């Protein structure tokens, strides 16, 4: 199972919005609404941001939102803050009863 | 609030068995809705799902094809924990290993354990 495709890096200024894409196939992203997104700061474990394409965990800022169109899922972060600087990963269930992750995107807040 | 606490050695010799344990608090390994997963992360392979165990009237396991011949994930109900064994390790198995809960079987993970760096080296 090949990794999902994410841009290696994105950047934005405080207060701006950015979108990170996650492209798969009909065997994973396009075939299921089981896309999730994680934030990872250096030396820390990943933290869940979005499950089921567009569901935020209780207590998570509504600055984070998810969507999906066809084989591509997206994570949008609005009102960028310095603490949003981190690595972001998508994942999806696959038709081989496994889970595949994206290669990760490094977000830089300018 | 579920929490996961990992334990196990950080150094394993090539051809030997990697063994890690994940202790659960705030939930049960025998939960009829959750699944208990192992995921690893390395610079070369990124995040890689390894497998899971879960209870739905009986115990089930699913494993990634890449490690299926070498992996065992075992629930330990008396201690409310689950374990990972990966046999015949090579330097390519060097990674940070995480345990993680999938609360509702929706293939998303929350929370994660703290991570264990396992180095395969003689």
Image (spheres, coloured by chain):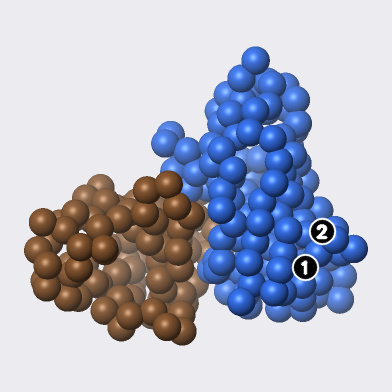
Q: Which residue lies under the disc numbered 1? A: B29
- Residue A72 located left or right of residue B115: left
Is label 2 in a helix, a strand or a loop? strand
Q: From mark 1 to mark 2, how far is it between C-alphas? A: 7 Å
Q: Could you say where residue B73 lies in the image, as x and y percent from the top left?
A: 76, 51
- Residue A8 located left or right of residue B107: left
Q: Could you say where residue A98 lies in the image, as x and y percent from the top left?
A: 59, 58
Q: Which residue lies furthest to the right in this view?
A: B78
Is label 1 in a helix, a strand or a loop? loop
Quadrant occupied by the N terminus of chain B:
bottom right
Is residue A72 placed above or below B67 in the rendered structure? below
Q: Could you say where residue A2 lies in the image, as x and y percent from the top left?
A: 45, 47
Question: What's the chain of the residue with tag 1?
Answer: B
One can see residue B36 in this view: yes
- Residue B63 located left or right of residue B78: left
Q: Which residue is drawn at 65% across and 15% down?
A: B122
Q: Residue at x 59, y 43 (%)?
A: B116
Tell me if label 1 and label 2 are in contact, CB under 8 Å: yes
Q: Which residue lies under the disc numbered 2? A: B75
If you read the primary sequence from the N terminus, does the residue marked by circle 1 or circle 2 appear first?
1
Chain A shade in the render: brown
Q: Which residue is drawn at 49% across and 72% down?
A: A34
Q: Could you say where residue A18 lies in the image, as x and y percent from the top left?
A: 17, 67
Chain B shade in the render: blue
């Amino acid at each position: 199972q090949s990794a999902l495709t994410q841009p290696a890096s994105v950047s934005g200024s405080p207060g701006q919005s950015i979108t990170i894409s996650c492209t798969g196939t009909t065997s994973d992203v396009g075939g299921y609404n089981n896309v999730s997104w994680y934030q990872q700061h250096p030396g820390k474990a990943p933290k869940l941001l979005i499950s089921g394409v567009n569901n935020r965990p209780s207590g998570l800022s509504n600055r984070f939102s998810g969507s999906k169109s066809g084989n591509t899922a997206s994570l949008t972060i609005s009102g960028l803050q310095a603490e949003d600087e981190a690595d972001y990963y998508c994942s999806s269930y696959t038709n081989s009863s496994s889970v595949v992750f994206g290669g990760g995107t490094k977000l830089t807040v300018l | 609030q579920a929490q996961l606490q990992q334990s196990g050695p950080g150094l394993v010799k090539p051809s030997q068995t990697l063994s890690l344990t994940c202790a659960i608090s705030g939930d049960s390994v025998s939960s009829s809705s959750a699944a208990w997963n192992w995921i690893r992360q390395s610079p070369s392979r990124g995040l890689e799902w390894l497998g899971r165990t879960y209870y739905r009237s009986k115990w089930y396991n699913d494993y990634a094809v890449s490690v299926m011949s070498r992996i065992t994930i075992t629930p330990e109900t008396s201690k409310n924990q689950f374990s990972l064994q990966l046999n015949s390790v090579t330097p390519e198995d060097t990674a940070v290993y995480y345990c993680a809960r999938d609360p509702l079987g929706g293939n998303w993970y929350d929370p994660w354990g703290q991570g264990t760096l396992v180095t395969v080296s003689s």
